[in-house]
Amino acid sequence: MRDSLPSFDLAKSATMQVVQAEPFNAGTPLAELADSYIQPTSHFFVRTHGTIPSLDPETTTIHVQGLLAQPFGMSITEIKQQLPYIEQVSTLQCAGNRRQEMHAYQPIYGELPWGANGLSTATWGGAPLRALLERCEIEPAALHLVFESYDQVERHGQTFGYGGSIPLNEPMIEHSLLAYTMNGAPLPALHGGPLRLVIPGIVGARSVKWLRSIELSAEPSHNYFQRRAYRLAQSSEPEAWQTAPMLHELPVNAVLCLPTPDQPLTAGTITLAGYAITGGQALVERVEISLDQGQTWQSARLIDPPTLGCWSRWQIELELAVGAYQCWVRATDSLGQQQPEQPAWNVKGYHHNAIQRVRLTVC
Ligand code: MTE
């Protein structure tokens, strides 16, 4: 096993909302999310299940194996030298984003209490995943890309590397990267450096950090984080999670970031701001606000042009008199998908995308 770095990040712990100290997990403050389309690396959320491996980019190799004519390995140096380099802006979102709100609806036990800040956007740079796949003579039986990592995670008395998979026919593969830069600098270890996957539009869990291998397989990954966790189960009983759907595309979602819940509001023009996101190949189409429990809706302005695999921030000015309001926020995407009124509760509190209801008190 390789050396590990401390997972606790002192600089981030000062500016971020720490959800767990060890392994380190932290969200970007909501006000900052509303403020900036791209998060500086120092403010990008962190979701880590195990160790932070210390890997030498000169010697670390990615193994490409399984159902292909000729398995091979490529060092990160070879990936940099032999495959094209591109940059793209993509949002990553954790499956547990907005879990606390789902917990308030019906309790969720033993999971990290994420608010609505388990997501961030960055400019990622690296080799297109497609460029690597083009080097493979893939056998017809291969249906999934299975990823394994160099980190070490402990679950139920066993230690193993994190992993997951996506179907080989996933259209977002065309927009996926073997990323080794983040916001124009070398990818830091905390975010998966020296090399990670960035798979936009798909649950962040599949953007495997510290990538070790890519396997062409007839089946989805057998890793704990594909077979057991990151499934929409109604209970922890084996029969419930064995048949529960595996998480894949992100659901359509909108969140109010400003005003923050504790912010005093004065009667008059009040600016509401937040973000919206959707999954797969869909684009955010509109964000609406209701102050009368969904009877009427007003459209907010999308500040960022809808872009594949990226969030859009939104804003609206409302004339509000003194009083207490319940503000509903909902997004609709280009496939007509709209947020439900009630949460689709599940035992691990994933993919919460019910219409957000926020109390606003104007004095
Ligand atoms: N990859 C490894 N090897 N180990 C992990 O714990 N966490 C996953 C994913 N890739 C994880 C991983 C999850 S659940 C998310 S949401 C994203 O990484 C978070 O990436 P970030 O920490 O750069 O924000």
Image (tube, grey):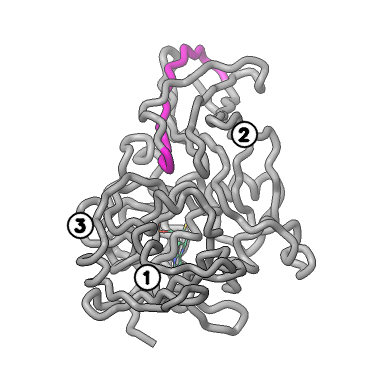
Q: Secondary structure of the magenta portion, mostly? A: strand
The quarter of the image holding the N terminus is: bottom left
Residue 152 magenta: no
- Kind of residue sitting beneath label 1: Trp
Q: First in sequence: mark 3 or mark 1? A: 3
Residue range in magenta is 308-323
Q: Mark 1 vs mark 2: give the one in front.
A: 1
Residue 322 magenta: yes
Q: Nearer the viewer, residue 293 or 311?
A: 311
- Kind of residue sitting beneath label 2: Gln
Marks 3/1: CA–CA distance: 16 Å
* Residue named by callout 2: 339
Circle on res. 185: 3
* Residue named by callout 1: 210
Q: Residue at x 52, y 43 (%)?
A: 279
| Label pair 1/2, CB-CB below 8 angstroms | no
Instruction: Give percent across and percent down for residue 362.
Output: 50, 20
